[in-house]
């Protein structure tokens, strides 16, 4: 979130502004950072809703009232429900610390190290109803070093994630993406 805000400020992402930073966790580090950056913050605490449907309805209502064009997930550790996905079809993107479709879900860096792959990386993709299965927008690779730990690999991937997410958002907000089935095409390439 902070990297996206910085990219907007530095005009790496053009024609965009952050309307709000929303979290289901009132203690999320991103909320404090967003406040420091002077961004509008909204907490919709999922623990205050006994029913997942009521939580999702409140989230959908809030997002529609904000009149957003794009939802960028960053550290949102919940499965996005089908009601939300249908309400914002092809308007939700996520960054994942692996070259999807390899190593979806949690602990992607640990999975990559455990599997013994030589290259991993990060992926920006549209969110669909599967876990990290949506159409892929962009990917960047990261070579795995023999002495890598989960922490060292995660740090190198994170550097690439900040660049890649900004590139993908910029393509989206400047209407450069076309989705055909599972494939995302960049207009003009």
Image (cartoon, helix red, strand yellow):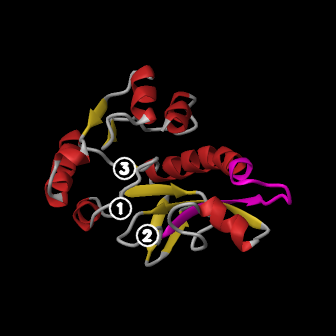
- Can I make out residue 26 in this image? yes
**Residue bearing the label numbered 3:** 71
Asked if marks 2 and 1 touch (Cβ < 8 Å), the reply is: yes
Q: Earlier in the sequence, mark 1 or mark 3?
A: 3
Query: Is the residue 102 above or below the residue 189 in the image?
Result: below
In the image, residue 181 lies at what x, y percent?
43, 78
Observer-nearest residue: 54 or 113?
A: 113
Quarter of the figure that contains the C terminus:
bottom right
**SS assignment at label 2:** loop
- Indicate left or right for 120 with 177 as reference: right
The residue that appears at 18% across and 42% down in the rendered structure is 65
Q: Which residues are magenta?
A: 135-153
- Can I make out residue 139 in this image? no
Query: Is the residue 53 above or below the residue 61 in the image?
Result: below
**Residue bearing the label numbered 2:** 131
**Residue bearing the label numbered 1:** 79
Tell me the quarter of the picture where residue 143 sits: bottom right
- Indicate left or right for 96 with 99 as reference: left
Q: Is residue 20 magenta?
A: no
The residue that appears at 46% across and 47% down in the rendered structure is 75
Query: Is the residue 147 above or below the residue 24 in the image?
Result: below
């Amino acid at each position: 979130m902070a990297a996206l805000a910085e990219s907007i400020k530095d005009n790496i992402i053009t024609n965009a502004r952050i309307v709000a930073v929303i979290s289901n966790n009132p203690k999320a580090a991103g909320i404090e950072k967003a406040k420091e950056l002077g961004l509008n913050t909204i907490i919709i605490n999922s623990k205050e809703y006994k029913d997942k449907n009521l939580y999702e309805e409140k989230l959908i209502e809030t997002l529609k009232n904000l009149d957003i064009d794009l939802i960028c997930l960053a550290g949102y550790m919940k499965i996005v429900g089908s009601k939300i996905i249908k309400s914002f079809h092809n308007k939700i993107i996520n960054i994942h610390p692996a070259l999807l479709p390899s190593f979806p879900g949690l602990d992607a860096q640990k999975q990559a190290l455990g599997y013994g792959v030589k290259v991993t990386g990060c992926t920006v993709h549209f969110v669909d109803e599967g876990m990290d299965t949506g159409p892929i927008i962009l990917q960047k690779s990261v070579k795995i070093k023999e002495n890598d730990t989960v922490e060292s690999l995660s740090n190198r991937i994170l550097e690439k994630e900040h660049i890649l997410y900004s590139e993908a958002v910029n393509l989206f907000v400047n209407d450069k993406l076309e989705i055909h089935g599972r494939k995302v095409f960049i207009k003009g390439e």
